[in-house]
Amino acid sequence: MAAVSPPETDFLYVDRAEPLAEFCTAIKDVPWLAFDTEFIREKSFYPKLCLIQVGVPGSLACIDPLALEDLSHRVSPAAPTRIASAGTSQASNPTPVADRGPRTSSPH
C-alpha cells in the first residue's frame, strides 16, 4: 500500500491584533471551522483562557489570548450551521455557542 502524504496546511501563531484581524477576515467564507480552547486553572479561582486553536480547510491557527489585549475581532462564517463547545470539562453537556440557520438533524 502506498504512503499517503498529509495535506498542505498553513500554520499561524497569532499574538498581535493585526494578524488576528487578517485571519478573521480571511476565514469569513470558509465552508467549515473547528476550534478548541485551553484554560489555565492552576493558581486561580476562575479558569483563564490561554489558547484558542482554530482549524479551517488548509489552515491552522493558534491564537494566544494572553498576548492580545483585544479579542473583539469576530468571525461569522456563513456556511457552518452549528458550532458547539464540548471540552473535557463540558463533555457530558455540550454548550451551543452559536446556532445559525435551520437544523438538518435533531440536537443530541
Image: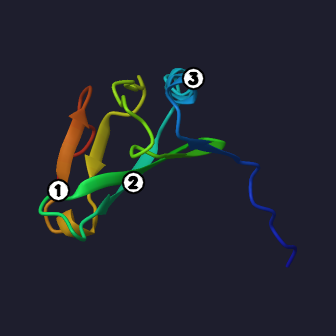
Residue at 39 percent of width and 24 percent of height: 73
Farthest residue, direction front:
43
Residue at image x 37%, y 25%? 74
Q: Amino acid at mark 3?
A: Glu
Judging from the image, what secondary structure is the residue with disc 3 in? helix
The N terminus is located in which quarter? bottom right
From the viewer's perspective, is residue 24 above or below residue 2?
above
Q: In what quadrant of the picture does the C terminus appear?
A: bottom left
Q: Nearer the viewer, mark 2 or mark 3?
A: 3
Determine the CA span between mark 1 and mark 3. 35 Å
Nearer the viewer's eye, disc 1 or disc 2?
2
Q: Earlier in the sequence, mark 1 or mark 3?
A: 3
Where does label 3 land, which residue? 22
Q: Earlier in the sequence, mark 1 or mark 2?
A: 2
The spot of residue 63 in percent (x, y) is 48, 44
Q: Residue under circle 1? A: 108
Q: Secondary structure at mark 2?
A: strand
The residue carrying mark 2 is: 36
Classify 15 as above or below 23: below
Amino acid type, callout 1: His
